[in-house]
Image (tube, rainbow, N blue to C red):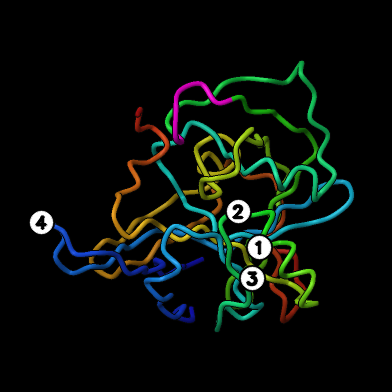
Amino acid sequence: MKFEYKIYPRDPVPGAPEGLIFQPKIPITVYGPTGKISFDALVDTGADHTIFPRFNASHIGAPLHEKNVSYTNGIGSDGIKSFYAEGIELEMKVDNEICRWTAPVWFSEQDDFPALLGRKGFLEYFTATFDGENSILTLEPNGNFSGNVVNIWDHDKIS
Amino acid sequence: MDKVPLVSLELSGKWIAWDELHTHVVASGASLADVHEEVEKKGEKNVWFDKVPSRTDFFGGAAFHK
């Protein structure tokens, strides 16, 4: 599955005079017990886990319990409370393929950061190739992946 | 793979909602909740929420400690 990097404008600065930001973001849909919400989520090899803004949790009916609290650093300030939620499914679709799996994900107490796809819940399931020359991210399900990859044209279940 | 159009610089730092095909921005705002509300009011379906990077600051990544 190939995804072009998203490109955003920014003010030119020394070291980055082109005034553009290239981010490996992919469209991903988050499914909870009562709904779904879709994001352009940043694939972040520096992130330990997959984490979404808390707003999502209420929208999709994900139960957040104090017993599942941990803390996440580096998304705006130190030690932001985040809630682990069970039973969440993630789905990505590109061209004629849909990839869907159940993932351990967290919801942050704050909302002001992009949805982040880190190692736990995302990168652990894929072999990722970041083609910096062509700004293309390639993701292939690996041996850890236990979800489904479906071809939407012939409806054959591939794995 | 379809190329997503470049957003305007005025949307930097904001939450936005793309239409289903990622062809145009249907809502924008300071918070995800605001944008979601606008999307609901407009009756838009199957949107993609996106946080546009700041026009002035770099995003240091999730492992970056402030």
Per the model, the C-alpha gap separating discs 4 and 3 is 41 Å
User: In which image quadrant can residue A46 be found?
Assistant: top left
User: In the image, what residue occupies the spot 72% across and 48% down?
Assistant: A56
Q: Residues within 10 Å of mark 2 (few under 14, many from 20)?
A: some
Q: Which residues are magenta?
A: A75-80
* Mark 4 vs 3, N-terminal side: 4
Q: Name the amino acid type tagged 1.
A: Val
Residue A12 on the magenta span: no
Per the model, the C-alpha gap separating discs 1 and 4 is 33 Å
The residue pinned by badge 3 equals A97
Chain letter of the residue beneath label 2 in the structure image? B
Q: Name the amino acid type tagged 4.
A: Pro
Q: Which mark is residue B31?
A: 2
Q: Residue furthest top?
A: A67
The reply to whether callout 1 and callout 2 are in contact (CB within 8 Å) is yes
Q: Name the amino acid type tagged 3.
A: Glu
User: In which image quadrant can residue A66 be found?
Assistant: top right
Could you tell me if residue A19 is visible in this image? yes
Q: Which mark is residue B35?
A: 1
Chain letter of the residue beneath label 4 in the structure image? A
Chain letter of the residue beneath label 1 in the structure image? B
Q: Name the amino acid type tagged 2.
A: Ser
